[in-house]
Image (spheres, rainbow, N blue to C red):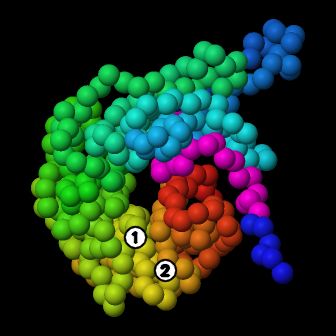
């Protein structure tokens, strides 16, 4: 008997572009249109979706002649039906420049993309899409030039801190840079922060620290006021680290969660920031963890696998809350978590 055809996951939408980055715009970028109560036809007019009902996606086919465009897209997400729009509601093609990594400014200034070809960073401003009666949110390429990020090679990790006053970049060459935003004055710069590529970055919510992850490990926690490394969190027993996230447990206690892989599968490690020692390790899944994130309230951790599965874990007891099989098709993906307001 022949193999059964692989069915697309529920609610899957294909936009003709391979994506490398995805994010949710800040809620306040685009407010819903207020309907005039004196308008007798207001019930028949569509309401403008809030910015939180959009997602931003970036990717493309690269520099070659594949025929696949490079672009930053906006899609609409309907929470009631748990579905994306059939087509992007806005598409900004970037010609031969492939947007590979992306970070959105949390206060709505815009977004930054690290381009794979050429190896540079580009800024995009939010714009009003005047060609659409409903989906008013759009993007436009800014004339802003980041001279501080010219000729520094491919940037594989980008992150803003919570209040949008600092931007961090991690390079293919192992470099770590943190700038004040928007002045781009250097806060921290280490050309050899890691001996291998920087794969992940995360600011603590209090703005005091940043953690950087070299390819496979180790993780290093940096003090932003002094610019020194406070601790180096190393692998053991043939582990490979794949993601790192800070979390505040209570007023005085902070931990760092690290996704770690061995030949047996993926685990989540909990490290103390008091002494930079491992507190615990919890085996999660018999597959590698290739994407890792934490909900805004710190209550949930999300793991993505090369098989396309998503696993949601309680950070309190490390018990699996939800597993979504074959959420994505293909090898590896990155994602962000939105809407955990428990």
Indicate the quadrant containing the C terminus: top left, top right, bottom left or bottom right: bottom right
Give residue 294's position: percent from left, percent from top: 49, 62
Give residue 58's position: percent from left, percent from top: 49, 42
* 19 is within the stretch colored magenta: yes
**Residue 242, disc:** 1
Is residue 294 at least partly visible in the picture?
no
Q: Please, what secondary structure does the residue beneath circle 1 have? A: strand
The residue where tag 2 is placed is 266
Q: Which residues are magenta?
A: 7-28
* 88 is within the stretch colored magenta: no
Q: Please, what secondary structure does the residue beneath circle 2 have? A: strand
- Of the two numbered discs 1 and 2 on the same chain, state the one appearing first in sequence: 1
Q: Quadrant of the rendered structure where residue 41 is?
A: top right
Residue at the image position 82 percent from the left and 9 percent from the top: 39
Name of the residue lying farthest toward the front: 65
Which residue occupies the foreground of this view, 177 or 152? 152
**Gap between marks 1 and 2 measured at Cα:** 10 Å
Question: Circle 1: is it few (<14), some (14-19), or many (20+) Cα within 10 Å?
Answer: many
Give residue 198's position: percent from left, percent from top: 28, 61
Residue at the image position 61 percent from the left and 52 percent from the top: 339
**Is 243 left or right of 166, judged from the image as shown?**
right
């Amino acid at each position: 008997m022949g193999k059964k055809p692989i069915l697309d996951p529920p609610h899957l939408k294909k936009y003709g572009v391979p994506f490398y980055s995805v994010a949710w715009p800040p809620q306040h970028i685009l407010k819903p249109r207020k309907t005039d109560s004196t308008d007798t036809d207001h019930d028949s007019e569509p309401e403008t979706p809030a910015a939180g009902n959009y997602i931003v996606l970036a990717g493309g086919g690269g520099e070659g002649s594949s025929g696949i465009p490079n672009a930053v897209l906006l899609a609409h997400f309907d929470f009631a039906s748990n579905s994306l729009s059939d087509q992007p509601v806005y598409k900004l093609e970037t010609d031969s420049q492939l947007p590979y990594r992306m970070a959105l400014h949390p206060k709505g200034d815009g977004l930054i993309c690290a381009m794979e070809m050429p190896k540079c960073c580009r800024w995009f401003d939010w714009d009003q899409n005047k060609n659409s009666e409903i989906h008013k949110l759009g993007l436009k390429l800014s004339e802003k030039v980041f001279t501080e990020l010219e000729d520094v090679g491919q940037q594989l990790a980008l992150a803003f801190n919570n209040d949008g006053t600092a931007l961090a970049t991690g390079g293919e060459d192992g470099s770590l840079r943190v700038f004040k935003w928007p002045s781009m004055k250097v806060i921290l710069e280490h050309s050899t922060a890691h001996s291998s590529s920087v794969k992940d970055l995360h600011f603590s919510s209090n703005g005091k620290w940043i953690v950087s992850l070299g390819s496979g490990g180790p993780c290093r926690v940096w003090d932003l006021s002094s610019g020194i490394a406070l601790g180096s969190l190393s692998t053991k027993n043939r582990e490979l680290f794949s993601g790192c996230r800070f979390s505040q447990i209570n007023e005085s206690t902070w931990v760092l969660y690290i996704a770690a892989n061995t030949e047996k599968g993926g685990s989540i490690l909990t490290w103390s920031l008091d002494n930079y020692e491992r507190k615990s390790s919890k085996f999660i899944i018999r597959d590698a963890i290739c994407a890792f994130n934490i909900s805004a309230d710190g209550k949930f951790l999300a793991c993505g696998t090369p098989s396309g599965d998503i696993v949601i874990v309680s950070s309190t007891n490390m018990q699996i809350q939800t597993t979504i099989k074959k959420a994505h098709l293909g090898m590896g993906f990155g994602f962000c978590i939105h809407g955990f307001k428990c």
